Each structure stands twice: as C-alpha cells, then as structure tokens.
Image: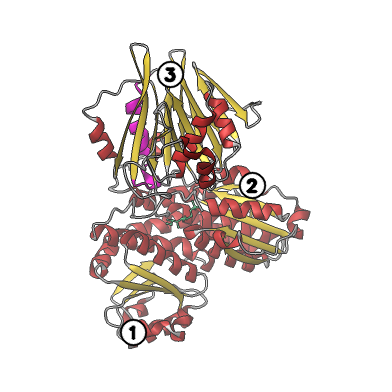
Amino acid sequence: MCGIIGYIGKKQALPVLIKGLRRLEYRGYDSAGVAILETDQNKTVIKRIRAVGRIDNLADKIKDEKFVGHVGIAHTRWATHGGVTEENAHPHFGCDDRLAIVHNGIIENYREIKEMLGNSHTYKTETDTEILAHLIESYYQGDLRLAIEKALSFVRGTYALVAIHSDHPDMVVAARLGSPLVVGVNSVDDNDEYFVASDASPILAYTKKVIFLDDNEVLEISNGKMNTFNLKDEIVQKNIEEIEWDESEAQKQGFPHFMLKEIFDQPRVFVDAIRGRYDLKNGISFLGGLNMTEEEMHSINKIILIACGTASYAGMVGKYAFERLAEISTTVEVSSEFRYSDPIVDNKTLVFVLSQSGETADTLAALREAKRKGAFVRGIVNVIGSSIARETDGGTYIHAGPELAVASTKAYTNTVAVLLLYALQFGRLKRTSLVTGERMLKAMLEIPEKMSKILAQSDKIKAIALKYKDCKNMMFIGRGINYPVALEGALKLKEISYIHADAFPGGELKHGHIALLSEDFPIFAIMTKDQLYDKMRSNVEEIKARKAPIILIATEGDESAKNLSEDIIFVPETLELLEPLLNSVALQLFAYHTAVLLGRDVDRPRNLAKSVTVE
Ligand code: M6R
C-alpha cells in the first residue's frame, strides 16, 4: 500500500528520498514520484518527477536532471482512485505548482470537495489526493499548517499526508488520520534533520529516535524545529521513542529473497516470541500485556480472534488451543466481516486483534467496533508502535522482526506461538494441569530445532515443487488443527505462484470437491500423527483411488505413508497443538520454490500490498 518518505535537513534530499522509496517497496506499489524544493537565486520552486512502475524507472528519469535541495517528499503509489499513470502518481500539486502533497489513504468525500471548490480549479488527475491538494490551496493565505488544518477539518476518510510549499523553503507539514506516519529525529553536527515516513524502515539507516504521529495530529517542521498540533491548533507534547530494530535486520542477509530469509528466520525469532513469557517449573505462561486481573480472566466466557488473511489462519489455530486448554468458546472472525456484522460482544468477551503490520484498515476498524461494544480488546502485533498496538488496551508483540516479503511467514508462526501461550495462561487458570502445561512448554522449546530440520529439507521440497510447478490447480486438505494449516498453505501458494489453490477439511471432500480430482489435479494432504490421523489417511486413500497425484506432509517414522505417495515431506513429531508451527514451514518452502521456479516476483507478487491500509 502507498508509502511516504519526506526529508528536511542539511543533506541533499534526493538520495535520501530515493533510498527511502526503495525501503518502502515491500509495501507494494505501481508508480512512484518525488518533489524537491529547489532554491536558485532566492527563488524557490518545486521540482517534481514521477514514473510508472519500479523505483528504478524513477531513478532513471532523474539521472539526467539537476535536483538540488534539502527538503523534499516522495511516494510509492498503490492505485485506488484512477488508473496506474504518471499523471496519477504522487506528489500532487494544486493549480499553481507551489504546493505539493503526498498522501496515503482515501478521501471519501472528494467529489463533494470538488463540487465545493467549483470551477475555479483545474484538475489534471483522477485522484482523490489531487482534490485534497486543491482544497489546501484554497485555504492557503501564507500559513501552510493552518491551511492544512482547515482543509482536514472538512475531509472525511483517512490520510497520512506530507506537504511542502515553495513559499516555505525550510518547512515540511505532515498530518495523520487512520494511516500511519513515523517521524525520525536525528542530530548531525548540532543540526537536527527529520524524516517523515509511513513506517520506520526508511528511517532506520539514519536514526532510531522517532515519534509516532497520532490520529488528528498535524506536525510542522521548520527552521530545525518540530511541533505537533491538534486540529484545534493547540500544541501536543510528543515523546521521542527508541526503535529496537536495526537496519541490517531489514536486509536480505545473503538470501535471494526476503521471503526465504524470513522463512529461515523462524527458529530464531520463535525463541524471541516466547522468551521470558513462561515458567517451565510451574507449567505456566504469563503475558503481562494481557492487563487483566485473575477475576477478570475468570469472567471471560467468549474469545473472539479478529484478523485478515494469514493472521486469521493463525487465529484458527488459536481457537483450537483456547477451546482445548481453557474451555472457552472461541470464534475467529475475518475483520472485514466483523466490522459489518452485528457481533454479540459484551464485557465478558475478550477480543484478540491479530496483525503483522498493525495497520490493516479492516482490522483496525473491527478493533474499534469491539471496543465500542465494551469487550476487553488486546492486540497481537508485530510492528512496534503501529496503530493497532497503540489503540488496544494491552497485548503482546510477537517479536518476529521486520517482515518485508508480502507473503507472511514468520509473523504467522510467531502469532501462533503467542496464541498458544495465551491459551495456556487461561488454561492453567481453568482446567489445564501442571503436567500438561509443563509438557506443552517443553514441546515448544523443542520447536526451533524441529523447524531447522524442516528447513534442512529445502532442496528436497524444491524437487517436489519442480515436479508440480506447471499444474493449474492444487487442493490442500487437512483435518482438525491442520485444516487452518491447509488454508494457509493454499493462500501462500496462490499469492506468490498465481497457481489456483483451495483448501478444505479432508472430511468435506466427498461432499463435492472430490468431483474435481483427476490425474492433473494434485492434492497436498497434511497427514501428520494427530488424533484424526486415521480419518485423514482414509481421505488420502480415497484420493489415491481416483488417481490424483498426492503430496504428503507426514510424521517422521510413518513408513506406511510411502504406500500413498512418493512425494512426502517428513516432519518431526510434536504435540498436536504445535503441529501447525512445523507443518506450515514445509508449506511455505513449497510455495516459495514453486514461485521461484515459475519466475515470479516472490517478494512483491502482483496486485498485493504488504500493509493493506485501505478498506
Ligand atoms: O498485517 P496483517 O497481518 O494485518 O495483514 C493481514 C493480511 O493482509 C496478510 O496476512 C496477507 O494475507 C498476506 N499477504 C498473507 O501472506
């Protein structure tokens, strides 16, 4: 989804902005642009260049231009209003090219604003953002911040906005409502420089000191000073925070793709997810972020897990754990449905909001709805300081580190890890025994080593992928706790390889889906040794009888699996509740290798964005 980077300081702005745009590439985009305040003989003008496609296209266009200036803004666009064209790419101007803005979000009432502005403005694009630029321009009487505040009080929708004006050669103004903005603050030789970005990734190369802008705040940086205001133009005090991630964590570290690096990160970051959050001797886990008294925990009679995509499949695993360990009725709701349903939620309901980015618009809206209805709302989030992390009344970071590939991998396993710890925390308060708690924690401690055993089979999994890469369809099946694993396996395959993939519970096959089976319709079956093993095995036999090719995930030592297929990924045995932590790794590698063999853009698959900040 759109990415923003702005710079004001002593450095030449252009290289900082281009480097920043590259750091934001992972969010997904279709065009990019940059605007710089350039002063020549006391006259300041805004120079702008935009290009469709990759940042490289933009960099190529800039190569032969003179771009000198210390203040600028840049943007990667993910089209919402208007096609993918150079005209529609940001930054956008008002009528007279003295104001430039970049924007992430949606101006819902842009038609109304356009009508209000009447015929006095000429528009060059199809975007909602350009209308906002004209609205600001219409209020401008020499004070950029005031003009922006006035304009925003009229706007309905969401925005992260950064603006420059040629009347103010040393000023950047930014504002936020619903879309994230982080401000990096750095001191170089007694001079302060500032970076304004959609997230910290383009800032970390320069500073770890940041402030997070909150909704309805407007930031003005001018003449080396930074001030934050609310929409009533009152000053708001902001704390400078220190970010833990360093820049190298955001790099590929020798792997050909971020996705592969992130798959291989899993044994290490899994340890980060559980570290300091359990007591083996007492078989308990304790996540301080829960922020609930024992009495409040006892009062909970329903848990709802709200999330989108991969995070929702992690949630489905969590459902099994909460019901089994804590006997609390648990449902998983897709955020975009929850926000428009009439959910039955009260003060005995605990809602967990799951999100890697912490910025997913639907999830954020669902969170607000759950809060409005009086539930306890807690976040399980990766990105520190993200909107969801800040809007929940507590919760837990999953500590997966930066996840830059669009396809989520390590955030999934770490979300499952945290959900298991929460389930145990509630379970030990209710029905789970010390022995069960201890056994589960011991098994969790063995997970990193077992994940590594699966990663060591990467080449073998690649060979299987080579055999099936040209299929047009694939069906994933699993039962019980491995049904969500099948869903996640299918999502991973389709989003990065573009092979059509679906997932069903094994027992559902004969209720319709089995009609699809043929010699060129492979089935990926998860048949590890859990309580539904025999049932699943029968389903696989049914498939074999219909001559559909079968790929299996089976438990190490299950020699009889070899009678069903020659394409088997053996995974180490673990407790049933923990199986998704291992089986998913095998499926991630399968999807990854298939996509690479097909020559796909693995880290940035078509049409997808890493952080879905619009509805
Ligand atoms: O940042 P979030 O976890 O809230 O994102 C949710 C989904 O958009 C995300 O998991 C998506 O499904 C990924 N592309 C899956 O790989």
In the rendered structure, the answer to whether residue 313 lies left or right of residue 40 reads right
Label 1 secondary element: helix
Q: Residue 22 placed where, x, y %? A: 34, 38
Q: Which residue is mark 3?
A: 169
Sequence-first disc among 2 and 1: 2
Q: Nearer the viewer, mark 3 or mark 1?
A: 3
Residue extending farthest bottom = 545
Label 2 secondary element: loop
Sequence-first disc among 2 and 3: 3
Residue extending farthest left = 64
Q: Nearer the viewer, mark 2 or mark 1?
A: 2
Residue type at numbered disc 2: Thr
- Per the model, the C-alpha gap separating discs 2 and 3 is 39 Å
- Residue at 53%, 23% (x, y): give it: 141
In the rendered structure, the answer to whether residue 55 lies left or right of residue 37 reads left
Q: Which numbered dot is residue 392?
A: 2
Residue 14 colored magenta? Answer: yes
Q: Which numbered dot is residue 517?
A: none
Q: Which residue is mark 1?
A: 544
- Residue at 41%, 51% (x, y): give it: 609
Q: Nearer the viewer, mark 2 or mark 3?
A: 3
Label 3 environment density (alpha carbons within 10 Å; few <14, some 14–19, many ≥20)? many
Range of the magenta residues?
11-30
Q: Residue 347 placed where, x, y %? A: 75, 57
